[in-house]
Image (cartoon, helix red, strand yellow):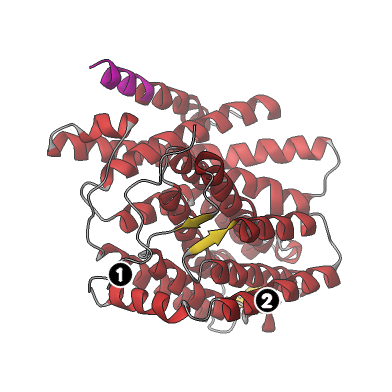
């Protein structure tokens, strides 16, 4: 009883911490930059806790893959909101379109997710378990397959001068197919701990109602707080003379990407690193399909000019940024082609991201993209024996069949951490 009481107190405390962010946003009040960063940042952090507890409990009723996909969609809402606003402004004002801030924010968010989020989950897993390889569930082969398809398409977008409605049709269709196949994965028995366990102990109807309320409330808190949090960080950066493009590409996404990274880290810290990595892989699929695919729509609606071959314009720098982001995505897919990530691979993802973060030279961006592409080919050649098995797993899930064997299966929770 004591444990349950503490669990419900924790849920109440996180819900209370979200309230100021929601209230201030809907009241239209913007606190000073430092205070705003603290208030809205705390609201996002608390919402991440609520989101992780609600989604873990939801696995009692839906598949883990679908639960993780729902987490990813909710957590990525801030990135959608910021990029939609930037794309809308670009459509309404040609001068805004020339600044390329929508593409800057989108590419920055995607690279942050892989360059910081994926290694962070791995190193939390390694710190807790001292295991040198993080193995994800075989069901993740579905996300990786769709991520590979989207990456193979996006990497050719820089050959054109626009992101058009044709790209919208292709990428949004990939997202719809991904969600459809994810929803067909069978529900597995889950072991809940902490607040999720307290919620899971409720009867079916109350439990499902609490889960829905938690997901909706956390989504509202994240959506309400992310943009003012990003704006507060940008204002703080401006006080130190940092360029607007840099702030939009890196500092704003650091705020908008924080919910899914926090959720993934919380899962990893509680012994569910494979599920945490699943959240980030699913988030990457969402951003690489739905986010990119819907930017031309926001641009064209704002501009009031529709056509199949026109859309969000791309200058040379933006095309380089998309190429570099797609090349990083290809390397990340190659890392998990065997459904494993090693210490060396996690370190490579982080170091390649960190060393190119502050480089603005256009030739350097192309060289980094080529380095990612070369490493991708090396890893695929090294793990070539695992590629057919991963592909077979993905297609078995699409056909609604059970996965043969259990070579890559993990228990419901990662091995107990070392003391």
Is disc 2 surrounded by few (<14), some (14 to 19) or many (20+) residues within 10 Å? Answer: some
Q: Position of residue 414 (x, y in %)?
A: 40, 46
Tell me whether circle 1 and circle 2 mark residues in contact (CB < 8 Å): no
Say which of marks 1 and 2 sits in front. 2
Nearer to us in this view, 214 or 141: 141
Is 7 drawn above or below residue 97 in the view shown?
A: above
The answer to whether residue 262 is visible is yes
Is disc 1 surrounded by few (<14), some (14 to 19) or many (20+) residues within 10 Å? Answer: some
- Image-based side of 329 in relation to 185, left or right: right
Residue 181 is labelled as 1
Residue that lies at the very extreme toward the top in this rendered image: 2
For the residue labelled by badge 1, is the local secondary structure a helix, a strand or a loop? helix
Q: Magenta stretch containing residue 76, yes or no?
A: no
- Of helix, strand and loop, which mostly describes the magenta segment? helix
Which image quarter holds the N terminus? top left
Q: Position of residue 404 (x, y in %)?
A: 27, 73
For the residue labelled by badge 2, is the local secondary structure a helix, a strand or a loop? helix
- Alpha carbon distance from label 1 to label 2: 29 Å
Question: Which segment did they paint magenta?
Answer: 1-10
Seen at 37% across and 65% down, the residue is 138
Seen at 32% across and 43% down, the residue is 56
Nearer to us in this view, 109 or 356: 356
Find disc 2 in the rendering and name its residue.
Answer: 373
Q: Magenta stretch containing residue 4, yes or no?
A: yes
First in sequence: mark 1 vs mark 2: 1
Nearer to us in this view, 35 or 392: 392
- Image-based side of 194 in relation to 304, left or right: left
Q: Position of residue 308 (x, y in %)?
A: 53, 83
Q: Position of residue 253 (x, y in %)?
A: 63, 49
């Amino acid at each position: 009883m004591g444990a349950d009481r503490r669990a419900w107190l924790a849920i109440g405390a996180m819900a209370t911490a979200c309230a100021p962010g929601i209230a201030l946003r809907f009241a239209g009040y913007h606190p000073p930059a430092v205070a705003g960063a603290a208030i809205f940042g705390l609201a996002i952090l608390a919402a991440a806790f609520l989101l992780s507890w609600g989604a873990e409990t939801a696995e009692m009723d839906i598949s883990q893959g679908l639960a993780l996909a729902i987490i990813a969609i909710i957590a990525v809402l801030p990135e959608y909101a910021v990029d939609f606003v930037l794309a809308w402004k670009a459509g309404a004002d040609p001068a805004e379109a020339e600044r390329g801030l929508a593409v800057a924010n989108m590419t920055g968010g995607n690279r942050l997710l892989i360059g910081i989020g994926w290694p962070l989950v791995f190193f939390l897993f390694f710190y807790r378990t001292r295991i040198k390889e993080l193995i994800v569930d075989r069901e993740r082969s579905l996300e990786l397959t769709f991520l590979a398809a989207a990456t193979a398409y996006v990497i050719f977008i820089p050959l054109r001068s626009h992101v058009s409605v044709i790209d919208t049709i292709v990428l949004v269709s990939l997202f719809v197919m991904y969600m459809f196949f994810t929803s067909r994965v069978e529900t597995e028995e889950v072991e809940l701990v902490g607040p999720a366990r307290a919620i899971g102990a409720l009867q079916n109807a109350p439990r499902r109602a609490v889960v829905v309320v938690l997901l909706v409330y956390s989504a509202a808190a994240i959506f309400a707080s992310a943009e003012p949090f990003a704006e507060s960080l940008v204002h703080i950066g401006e006080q130190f003379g940092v360029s607007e493009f840099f702030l939009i590409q890196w500092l704003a996404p650091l705020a908008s990407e924080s919910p899914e990274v926090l959720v993934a880290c919380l899962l990893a810290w509680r012994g569910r690193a494979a599920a945490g990595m699943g959240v980030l892989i699913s988030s990457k699929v969402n951003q690489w399909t739905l986010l990119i695919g819907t930017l031309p729509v926001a641009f064209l609606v704002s501009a009031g000019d529709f056509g199949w071959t026109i859309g969000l314009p791309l200058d040379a720098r933006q095309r380089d940024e998309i190429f570099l982001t797609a090349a990083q995505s290809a390397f990340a897919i190659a890392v998990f082609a065997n459904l494993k990530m090693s210490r060396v691979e996690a370190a490579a993802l982080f170091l390649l991201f960190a060393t190119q973060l502050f480089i603005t030279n256009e030739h350097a961006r192309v060289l980094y993209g080529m380095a990612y592409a070369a490493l991708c080919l090396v890893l695929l050649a090294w793990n070539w024996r695992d590629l057919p098995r991963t592909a077979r797993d993905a297609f078995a899930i699409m056909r609604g069949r059970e996965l043969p064997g259990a070579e890559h299966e993990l228990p419901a929770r990662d091995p107990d951490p070392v003391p």
